[in-house]
Amino acid sequence: MSQERWDIILRFHEGPLAVQGDLVLRGPVVRMGAAPGPGGLALEGYRGLDDRQAVITAYDGGTVTIAPVGINQVRVAPHANIDWKDVQVLQKPAFLSPGCAVHLGPPGRGVTATFVDARRLGEWEQRRILSDASQANPKIQPSNVATLDAGRRIPRWFIPATLVMGLFFTAGITFSIFRDVAANRPDLGPKDEGQAYYERVDIAKVTIDPALKDGINQGFHDFVMKPNSAQARWPALAKPEGWDPTFMQYTLASAKMHLRAWNYWRQLEVIKDDYGYVVEQLRKAGLPEVLAAIPYQESRYTDDAKSPVCAKGYWQFMPEVAHRAGIAVRNCSFRGAPGALYTPTRMTPRIGVLQNAEYVNFDGRKAECKITGCEVDERTDLAASTRGAIELLREAWEDPDISRSGAAVQITILSHNSGYDNSRFDEKRTNYINILPAYKRHLGAKQMERDPHFYGANITCTGAEHADIIVKGNDTCGGVIANQSQHYAYSIVAQHLLAVCYYAQNHADKPAFRPWKDYARRTGYCNTFAVPTQDEVLKKGGTQ
């Protein structure tokens, strides 16, 4: 009797497997879970999954079913564009047809995939033939199922096994619900007035709660490592073992400090419309959403913020950088020189801006901006300055070396602070604090072709003596990134991961924040700490 083998084709929608396109899994039985054992599909890097979460079985003729293992959660829907919390978990095997979506694990965690098709591969006796999946991914091994009686549409073991599975599910669902409800959320949330932002942290002085790390992992993956993986075409980067551990540690420490501060949450409430606007513009431009926290770090999303070196506005552009980005800055008055008007004409600030820029006073210890006002200054216009910021950020994001680095998100963030590569313009010489030449120096010193851990390896200015970023700004402390930038990117990532939670919980009705709503549900990463409600923030002094 001829016994045919049917392979199962799945397309994953998020996480490490999403970048691999259609996966062809060797049937007729595919076991799926965090550690499914030989013959299974290992779903590594996904939260909320058991070692053996579900089984897909393709019978003779292409009939395909999916069933949960034990009490584990499995849901099936006609398509993936659905709110999974509204779909009941399976209590018995369900048939799959092409285009059906399945969700493994709790809503907000786990993974969603579309069943594409079941494909006949020929005689089972041809056991040396490997499926496309096992060729593409050595972790997907051929199934150990030995035989299938093709003369019977359902094997004899199927019905009794289904009944036993149902009994286990019914007996265990109460325990599962009790376990989830009884699990106490860690005591992580706003505790004191604090600061609206923290410029740098000392990881030696901040204890990281395991629950916070477990939660933030999901956001760190989705907003940092997933874009890095896609930009570099490097699927392994989506897995936690490939992440930059120092960068991650600083991000966690910064997140803990910010989430404790009522002033941080107050400011998020005040700026919600502006933050949403920038998120939408970044999405339209195809840039990572985490970049929306740059104006928070720079100015707390205020239009009148100004630095001692005359950076101004939401994004804190210096005059020359604004000029290069098409952001109008004209006829600026200098303190003590009423007849002089300054309009930037250079494309980059002068190297050694403290000593050499005509608009800065510097006495060796303190810098002061001499500009008192400008007739035209679009740096204070959110739309104009965001448009210019996107063009400049795109330079770094799309640079071939940075794109393939595996650290494109963090390097692009750093480019806003250190500059991307000014050697293309006025000076015609390298500014060593610019991020592209710094990254190339790092690769040369390490004899590497690319390095996803570049940022963490260069957070070297960690003592209190380096905290003055005006006077000590260009120190590198043995690394290649300037001191002024070393503590910059992780703060921005931390601020964004928390902002996602606040806006998803309190303002998910706004289009900009609607895609984040799953993060605020019971199983989303935002529930590993206490996100204050809008009412709580307003009672603490926020404004609508």
Image (cartoon, rainbow, N blue to C red):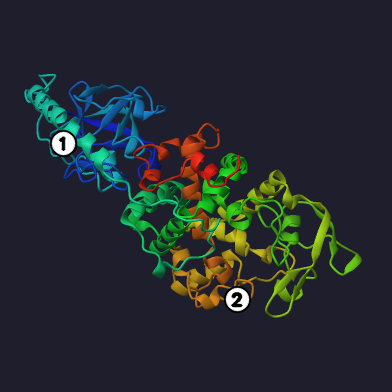
Nearer to the camera, 342 or 142: 342
* Apparent side of residue 380 relative to residue 409 in the rendered image (left or right): right
The crowding category of the residue bearing disc 2, from other C-alpha atoms within 10 Å (few below 14, some 14 to 19, many at least 20), is: some
Residue 503 seen in the figure? yes
Q: Which residue is mark 1?
A: 126
Nearer to the camera, 447 or 397: 397
Q: Pinpoint residue 42: horizontal percent, then vertical percent.
A: 25, 44
Nearer to the camera, 404 or 217: 217
Which residue sits at x=42%, y=47%?
Answer: 219
Q: Pinpoint residue 337: horizontal percent, then vertical percent.
A: 89, 68
Q: Secondary structure at mark 1?
A: loop
Q: Secondary structure at mark 2?
A: loop
1 or 2: tag closer to the N-terminus = 1
Query: Which amino acid type corresponds to the residue marked 1 in the rendered image?
Result: Gln
Q: Which residue is mark 2?
A: 472
Q: Pinpoint residue 366: horizontal percent, then vertical percent.
A: 69, 75
Quarter of the N terminus within the rendering: top left
Nearer to the camera, 321 or 511: 511
Q: Comparing marks 1 and 2, which lies closer to the viewer?
A: 2
Label 1 to label 2: alpha-carbon separation? 68 Å
